[in-house]
Image (cartoon, rainbow, N blue to C red):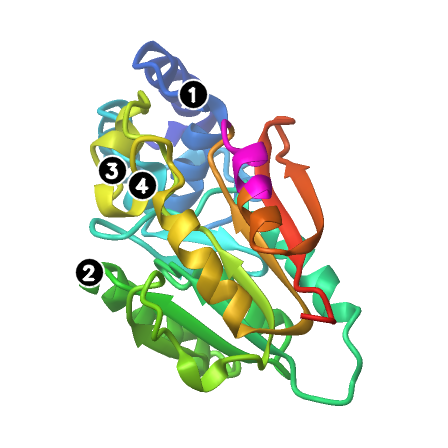
């Protein structure tokens, strides 16, 4: 009979291997991969003291892939946003924990709206559908629209949208379109309560971790020399889509909080506020379309 192996020493060994490889989060990654291979939750690992040798072999193989800087989410096949999990993999941007703060702000804003109409939300550069689907899950009363240009990313978004429908969430409407096109979503002009966006915003000269540089689609990452090309071009569309007193939240590179705020001010937005992420780095800017414009 094959002898079972103790799980905790395997995890300790995995943490050391990932740290040696330069992975920035060796402990959570080692534990999350253990939970993944065991089909359980990370917090329940302590309840599984022993594992079969074949499971240990699968775990070690995953650790070696992570040590090669393949993103954790590509190995598990999922990324979280709000209360939902999204399928992700090659060809689509992996949602980051920082975007959870933009999502939380969006939900808080929707709570302030009057109940005299169905809230309309637009997610620009939706990628995997993360923000749009998380909002639709949290606010089944909302009418949610999501725009994505890249066909590979749109395939992932459609897959995730179908999964959420099967789970009972309200459907979203997906568009294969360019967020900088002046004709974008013309049927929604002046009707939208909230526009959120996590666009390509990294300056072209930035140095990125291998997980990002080698695995996230470059089209989803880079926003021109200063990182603002897409944001600069889509702000007129945001202004056109929003109803009077509607709001927007735009994620940006940590070098560009003031730059995004200035662009919104130049477009006559009001109540402009910069928000930091959990690492206290500038991460997203919010603003409101004045009621008298």
* Element carrying mark 4: helix
Mark 1 or 4 closer to N-term? 1
Residues at marks 2 and 4, CA–CA distance in whole angstroms: 14 Å
The spot of residue 276 in percent (x, y) is 65, 34
Foreground residue among 31 and 49 = 31
Task: Give the residue displayed 23% in from the left and 41% down from the top.
Answer: 218
Tag shown at residue 221: 4
What residue does disc 3 label?
58
Q: Tell us which disc is closer to us: 1 or 4.
A: 4
Quadrant assignment for the N terminus:
top left
Q: Is residue 260 magenta?
A: yes
Q: Tell us which disc is closer to us: 2 or 4.
A: 4
Mark 1–mark 4 contact, CB under 8 Å? no
Mark 1 or 2 closer to N-term? 1
Mark 2 or 4 closer to N-term? 2
Residues at marks 3 and 4, CA–CA distance in whole angstroms: 32 Å
Tag shown at residue 152: 2
Q: Residue 214 appears in which quarter of the rendering?
A: top left
What residue does disc 1 label?
24
Mark 1–mark 2 contact, CB under 8 Å? no
For the record, the magenta segment spans: 255-262
Q: Tell us which disc is closer to us: 3 or 1.
A: 1
The spot of residue 234 in percent (x, y) is 42, 58
Residues at marks 1 and 4, CA–CA distance in whole angstroms: 20 Å
* Element carrying mark 1: loop
Quadrant assignment for the C terminus:
bottom right
User: In the image, is residue 68 above or below residue 16?
Assistant: below
Residues at marks 3 and 1, CA–CA distance in whole angstroms: 22 Å
Task: Give the residue displayed 72% in from the left and 63% down from the top.
Answer: 109
- Our reading of the magenta stretch's main secondary structure is helix
Task: Give the residue displayed 49% in from the left and 52% down from the top.
Answer: 80
């Amino acid at each position: 009979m094959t002898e079972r192996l103790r799980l905790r020493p395997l995890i300790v060994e995995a943490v050391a291997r990932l740290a040696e490889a330069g992975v920035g989060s060796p402990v959570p990654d080692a534990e999350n991969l253990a939970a993944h291979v065991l089909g359980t939750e990370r917090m329940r690992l302590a309840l599984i003291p022993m594992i079969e040798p074949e499971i240990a072999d699968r775990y070690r193989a995953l650790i070696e892939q992570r040590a090669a800087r393949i993103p954790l989410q590509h190995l598990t096949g999922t990324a979280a946003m709000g209360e939902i999990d999204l399928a992700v993999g090659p060809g689509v941007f992996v949602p980051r924990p920082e975007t959870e703060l933009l999502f939380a702000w969006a939900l808080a804003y929707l709570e302030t709206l009057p109940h005299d109409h169905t809230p309309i939300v637009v997610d620009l550069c939706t990628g995997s559908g993360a923000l749009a689907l998380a909002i639709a899950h949290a606010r089944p009363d909302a009418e949610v629209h999501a725009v994505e240009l890249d066909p590979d990313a749109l395939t992932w978004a459609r897959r995730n949208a179908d999964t959420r429908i099967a789970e009972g969430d309200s459907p979203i409407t997906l568009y294969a379109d360019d967020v900088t096109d002046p004709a974008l979503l013309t049927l929604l002009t002046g009707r939208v309560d909230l526009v959120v966006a996590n666009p390509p915003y990294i300056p072209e000269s930035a140095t990125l971790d291998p997980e990002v540089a080698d695995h996230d689609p470059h089209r989803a990452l880079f926003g021109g020399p200063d990182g603002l090309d897409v944001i600069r071009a889509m702000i007129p569309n945001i202004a056109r889509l929003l109803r009077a007193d509607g709001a927007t939240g735009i994620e940006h590179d940590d070098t560009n909080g003031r730059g995004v705020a200035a662009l919104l001010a130049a477009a006559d937005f009001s109540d402009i506020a910069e928000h930091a992420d959990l690492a206290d780095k500038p991460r997203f800017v919010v603003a409101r379309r004045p009621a008298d414009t």
